[in-house]
Amino acid sequence: MAKDTEKLIRQLSLISYLMAERRPVTAHEIRRDVEGYSGMNEDAFARRFYADRSELESLNIHLTVERPADGGAEQENYSLRSQNFHLQPIEFTDQELAALQTALHLLDGEFAYAEPLRLALQQITWGRPSPLRAPEQLSVALGITASAGGHELSHRLAKIETAIFRKKRISFDYYTMGRDEVSHREVDPYHLLFQGGEFYLLGFSHERGAIRVFKLSRIQGKVSYSTKSEHDFKRPSDFDPRQYASRAEWQLGEHKGVAEILISSRIAWQIQRHFGRYGDIRPASPTEGGPEDIVFLTPYASERSIIAWVLGLGEQARVLSPRSLARQLQDRLLSLREAHASMPTLACRAQGPPSPPKARRRGGARVSGEREGRPDAVIRPERFARLVTLATILIDSGRKGRRLPIDEVCQALQLTVEELKEDIAVLNVVNFGGGSYVLYAEIDEDAREIEVDPEPYSDNFERPARLLPVEAKALIAAIDLIGEHIPQGSLTSARKRIVQALGEDPMEQGLQVAQPPSDDSQIAPQISEAILHKRLIQLEYYKQSEDQITLRTVEPYALVNGREGWYVASFDPGKGAMRHFRLDRVKRVQVTDQSFQPRREVHPAAEVDGWMRTGEVPASASARVWISPERARWARESRRVAEELSDGSLVVELSFAGIDWLVKEILKEAGDAVVLEPQRARQAVLRATQRLLPTADAPPSHRSARQAACAKG
């Protein structure tokens, strides 16, 4: 028998024994009565028993130890309180159960933590209609599902997840984008963060002597344990993962100052709602702007990032201070204007084979109503959790005198038939001496059923066990990923009940799903209600590409998430076509009294596998865009490279459907991107820069290093 199997039998037998005795017992009694310990000498027993206790504690199963005041370790008494093993019942409403079922269905097979999520839902809904068999909802679709994205990245994620759980130091080679170098790292892994479609590791870097953030897709080669020790570190008590997920892009790093940005009244509501958390807001003075304009004060660590954000807002934003930041923004605009006023001279094509393209990450998607082939799950739940859940299912079936279909159990726990046979074989020998077994299950292969005979001590496992850390993390991460975007039920209220039952928020214990910058908490519930009751909605919508607010009355069909946030997939009767409206650009929504009949030809999730997942808009044209050497490394991760040039710059192909959208994308590159063709796009960028530049003559220092790089020839 494998050592892992022996350990599982020993630990399950120990739990059953302690709960069956209902009194403190001595180490001598445990060694004598519990399966797996009886053949050991005292030293071997002491080592194994200590290791088993430590591992159970890491699974949130804590034994109570009573030490006599004047006695040694051999006189300690041990017990396991029921509340330290069994999960507190959670009284979900039917709507909350429906919401949880929808969450599982949307993520099943695509979520990196899909299997632990299934086990968690089995446990928390015990005694209620299973959410795994509830009717499906067809009004939510996901383009971004926290999929690991690829075989190699999946293995890294699984190894790091295990290292966090076991508190093991890891080593790997890491590509640092800013320095363009690969270096070896020794890291104590503290936490995983999913943000913007990517997984990140937060951990203590021994080379840097500080906590650092590592993008998993930039880890190269194998992730290995650094030592053979049982544990290598203890996470600092003052480590707070939330601070790493609550900063704007321009705030990543050491703060250099506070930017004062004038925001026009047209988009003041949008900045207050979506970005107010990243700074402070005050009314603009008469000398600064109009009566309803505001000033946004936000700390920044990267001048380029805050400038790129401001330029993306077009004519609706202007940097007031510091003067050095305003001057740098002007320099970048002047450089951009010059590059589009006359065609820049580019460096020659690089010699040798081009660098291998970086695979652009495509987040997995699950559309409610579709059932595709099921890929292997990335994070496998601990087998301990699977055995405890299986025992609960088998005992319940035996008590009811019901024979369980093999296929039903395999589907519920995502097991193969061989895995099911192995798990049942383990459970059949869980005992603590004297014929005190927990259950006996027999597989009838002809009938493809399982017959269960519960033993007298089966009540130790007849109630669901506490969620193991990976199950709890999977459950809360799934809820946080979807948020309040399910028309029926509430994931927010379900989350509160789960955290209350667990006694802690799993988000703080190893995995955090960062919320997108946009805050649609007021808009999404109203639209969800309209979807549910098939009511027309009236949207006051800011069309950023044209810088205008429009009034639209549409039929809402589904809420869909993508790389830029959440959208409502709608049919616009005025346009006679499907339209997707970003929730963060909805200034106001009104649910009308007018109902609509859903159109058969409408497929609200049709775009999930396209631009929502990849970020590439449906194209009617393509532009060739020069990228500066300083930004080339980042462009390789997300753009389609057409040429590599000898000075380190790139030419990329950028698909676009509208000129206005392309202009915004170029402005957001803050002078590091220049349109080469088509000519009409170059002219559009030139006009946009002229509108953004002040009327005063440009200072003589405007010619930047980026423009000089263009002119090398």
Image (cartoon, rainbow, N blue to C red):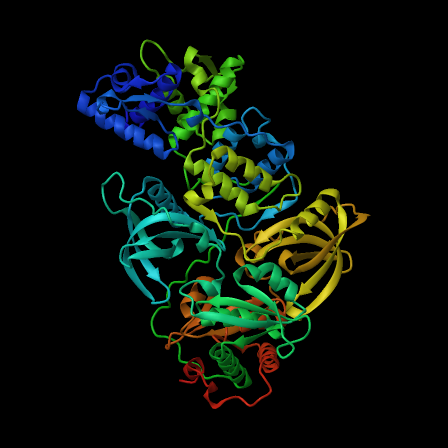
Residue 358, image x, y percentages: 41, 60
Quadrant of residue 441 within the rendered picture: top left
Q: Is residue 669 visible?
A: no
Q: How many labels does the image show?
A: 0
Residue 63, image x, y percentages: 35, 26
Q: In this view, does 700 lie to the left or right of 274?
A: left
In the image, farthest residue toward the front? 69
In the image, farthest residue toward the right? 594
Q: Residue at x 63, y 36 (%)?
A: 136
Residue 90, image x, y percentages: 55, 30
Q: In this view, does 644 lie to the left or right of 675?
A: left
Q: Nearer the viewer, residue 674 or 73?
A: 73
Relative vertical location of residue 331 with respect to residue 542 in this rendering, above or below: below
Q: Which of 329 and 384 is in front in this view?
A: 329
Q: Residue at x 45, y 27 (%)?
A: 465
Residue 569, image x, y percentages: 67, 52
Relative vertical location of residue 137 with respect to residue 68 in this rendering, above or below: below
Q: Nearer the viewer, residue 461 or 422?
A: 461
Q: Quadrant of the C terminus?
A: bottom left
Q: Is residue 591 visible?
A: yes
Q: Quadrant of the N terminus?
A: top left
In the image, farthest residue toward the top? 434
